[in-house]
Image (cartoon, grey):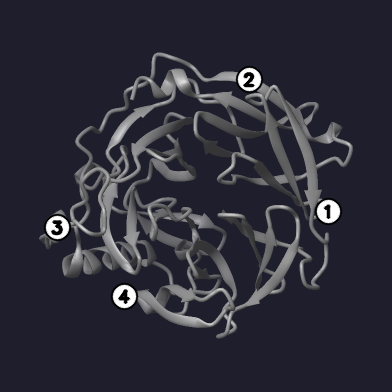
Amino acid sequence: MKKGNALIAVILIFWASLAMSCQKIDRRLSSTNAGTSTLSPSENILSQKRSEREFSSNTLELVAEINLENLERPCYKPTFLKFDEKGDLYTVDFSEFLIHKFTPFHDWTNCKHSFFGKGTGQGPGELSRVLDFKIFKDEVYLVDETTGSIELYATDGTYKKRIVLSNHLVPRRMTVQDKRIIVESLAPNGPLFFVYDLSGNMIFSFGELIDKTNVENSIYQDNELSDSFSGNRFYYLPRFLGFVGLYEGDRLVMAKETVDGLKIGKKNVPVEKAPMKGVIVRTMSKKYETVLLHALHKDFILIKTYDYEKKRTFWDIYDLYNFNYLMSVKNPPISQFFAIHEDYLALLIDTETGSKIQIIDMRKVLEEI
């Protein structure tokens, strides 16, 4: 495997795209009134106005806790957390590959538990290695690596269909929009993204890779795609690069630093990093994992990051529409996954007594934004 410049190639992708068609985004940007502005190369990745964190004075308040191993049908290996539009909460059990659903009553003082799915296997509706999990409107989408397909359920548990992509591409990450799915490939082969209709027919692709000599490098896969919002916008969230990309349809409209930023300069020249055995890449910062987890609120995006030098985890809040840094959560809890619906934050945690979902009231923290 050729070593070296995969991360820099990704940065060049953003630079090249932005130099051609980058829009400056104001808060609550709408597609009908956006003003187009071409950025110079030095401005391609926008900087945060603040580079130091400001922490909330309030802490998160626990309002409910669900012990997943004490359920009538236990959930032993929960992975992923997602809310639907109604506020029902879902997780995928990797022990039986069932989808568990929690419907709250009276502000989570109690909830109804149910589950659905066809379990482990490779037949229609069955799962064996879920790589991504999204909920769009009243449908549940699960990317399964073993079959290379997307399994589609209704949120009421009804199995709908298997989506097999027309060009035999194996999906890894996805975001769902009206009448189409945007997919990242498990084995990048040119474009960053492929667009399909809901029958799996490819419509087009976009986000051309510049350095094709390193397309097999796993650093291209070390990222997340957000849910779609405001119609056809979504975030591309690399783990190590120090910035995120905001897309509107097939156009990259903004690339912007996280609060830790790219840290480019004499003290932070590119250094080699081995994110996994046998793969060496050049990173722009040796200190931070800039996006470990994320969750979308109607007004902001919550991002979990990690500082290697301080050995400390941060939860940072950014404006959803222009990615301006707003504040950080004081003393964030340890969580494998989290999800947000209105004022409630759901956390998936491991304890000595088993896996649990905690429901957190965020109102006091949000009042400070």
Disc 3 from disc 4: Cα separation? 27 Å
Does 9 sit above or below residue 342? below
Question: Can residue 58 be seen in the rendering of this structure?
Answer: yes
Residue, disc 4: 210
Q: Nearer the viewer, residue 325 or 11?
A: 325
Task: Name the residue tied to disc 3.
Answer: 35
- C-alpha span from label 4 to label 2: 49 Å
Q: CA distance from mark 3 to mark 1?
A: 50 Å
Q: Residue at x 75, y 60 (%)?
A: 158
Q: Are marks 2 and 1 in contact (CB under 8 Å)?
A: no
Q: Residue at x 23, y 40 (%)?
A: 48
Q: Position of residue 244 (x, y in %)?
A: 34, 52
Q: Amino acid at mark 3?
A: Gly
* Residue with the most extreme right position: 72
Mark 1 is surrounded, within 10 Å at the Cα level, by few (under 14), some (14 to 19) or many (20 or more) other residues, namely many
- Exactly how many numbered labels are in the figure? 4
Does residue 343 appear left or right of residue 19 in this picture?
right
**Quick check: 170 above or below 352?**
below
Crowd tier of the residue under label 4, counting other residues whose Cα lies within 10 Å: few below 14, some 14–19, many 20 or above: some
Closer to the eye: label 3 or 1: 3
Task: State the mark number for residue 47.
Answer: none
Between the C-alphas of marks 2 and 1, the distance is 29 Å
Upstream in the sequence, badge 2 or badge 3? 3
Residue bearing mark 2: 63
Q: Is residue 361 above or below residue 188?
A: above
Determine the CA span between mark 2 and mark 3: 44 Å
Mark 4 near mark 2, Cβ–Cβ under 8 Å? no
Image quadrant occupied by the C terminus: top left
Amino acid type indicated by mark 4: Ile
The residue that mark 1 highlights is 96
